[in-house]
Amino acid sequence: MSVRFGVSPIAWVNDDMPELGGDTPLSTILADARDIGFAGIELGGRFPKDAAVLKPLLAGYGLDLIGGWYSAELLTRDVEAEISAARDHVALLKAMGSGVFVHAETSNAIHGQRGTPLSHTPRLDAAGWQAFGARVTDFAEYIAGQGLTFAYHHHLGTVVERPVDLEAFLSVTGAAVGLTLDTGHAALGGIDPVAAIRAHPKRIAHVHCKDIRAAVFAGLQTRGASFLDGVLAGMFTVPGDGGLDYGAVMRALADISYSGWIVVEAEQDPAVADLRSYGELGLRTLEREAHAAGLKKAA
C-alpha cells in the first residue's frame, strides 16, 4: 500500500477560465511543481499533446504525467463515437506511461458557464440513469482494456453532483467504473468524502484533494451564483486552509488500503492565492496526515 503525491495545473492556469493565470508559462508551472516536491502532475490545456515532446519535457523536471481530465458526451453520443473521440487522449496517456483516465460527463454540464447558477445543474430521471450507466460502463470497460484505470469525476454543475446522484450512478454502473473521489466537490455537493470512501472502497480509483470555505459557498448559493463565480470568490482552497478534516480522509484511505495518486487540486485565482505557499501547505498537510494514518509514501 503506497501513495504518491501529485498536483493539478489548474491552480496555475484555469482551463475553464483562461483569464486566471492564462499568461503563466508552462515552464513556471513545472518548475513550481518540482520545487514544491510533487512527484507528478496532471495534464493541462497548456501541455503539448505529443508524447515525443511531453515526455522529455516532464522528465527534465522530474515529474510523471499522472493522467488527465477527459470531457465526455455519453449522454448525447454512443459508445463507439466516444471511443473515437477519446482515441488521441488514450494514446497520449499510454505513451506517457500514465495509469489514470479521469472522465467526466460534460455534454450538459454548467460548471463552465459563468452566467448559469449552480441551482440549474442538470438532473437525470430513472430511465436516464439506466441509459447513462450502461454507456459509461461499456466505455469504462474499453478504457480498462487499454490498460488504464477509469476514474469518473463527480463534479459540481454536472449530473453526478449530490449524494443521490452518486448513489444512482454507482447503482447503474459496473465494476470497471471507478471514481475520482474529489473531496472538495464532494463536500460542497453534500457528499461526505470520508463516508463515500468507506461505503465504496472498491470504486475509489483516484483521489483529488481540495479544501473548502463553506461560508463562501453558502453565500454564493444565497445569491444564485455560478460555479465559476464560486471559484473567483474562493470557495476552494488547498488542504490545510479550509474546513475539511484531512486526517479523517487519510485514515479512511488507509483503512481501504488505497494505493495510487493523491492529487492537490484547488481552483483559485493565482493573483490572490500565492501558488508556491499554497501548494506547499497543501502538500505538507497531506504528507503529514497520510504518514499519521499509516499510508506509505512511494519512494
Image (cartoon, grey):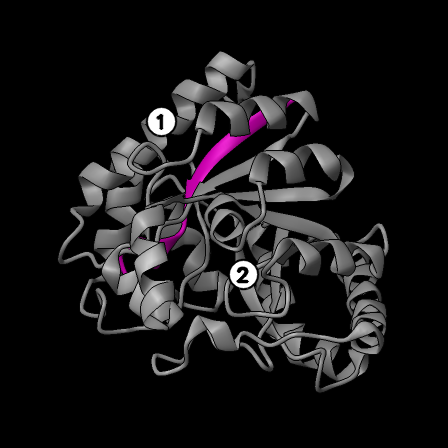
* Direction from residue 69 to residue 274 in the image, left or right: left
Q: Residues within 10 Å of mark 2 (few under 14, many from 20)?
A: many
State the residue in front, 113 or 284. 113
Is label 2 in a helix, a strand or a loop? loop
Up-down: is 212 above or below 135? above
Determine which quarter of the picture holds residue 43. Answer: bottom left
Residue lying farthest to the front in this orientation:
222
Residue denoted by label 1: 285
Position in image of residue 266 (x %, y %) = 35, 50
Up-down: is 73 above or below 136? below
* Direction from residue 137 to residue 157 in the image, left or right: left
Position in image of residue 128 (x %, y %) = 79, 77
Figure label count: 2
* Direction from residue 51 to residue 238 in the image, left or right: left
Q: Is residue 71 magenta?
A: no
Q: Residues within 10 Å of mark 1 (few under 14, many from 20)?
A: some
Q: Is residue 8 magenta?
A: yes
Residue denoted by label 2: 155
Span colored in magenta: 1-13
Position in image of residue 196 (x %, y %) = 66, 40
Q: Amino acid at mark 1?
A: Thr
The answer for how far apart the CA atoms under marks 1 and 2 are is 23 Å
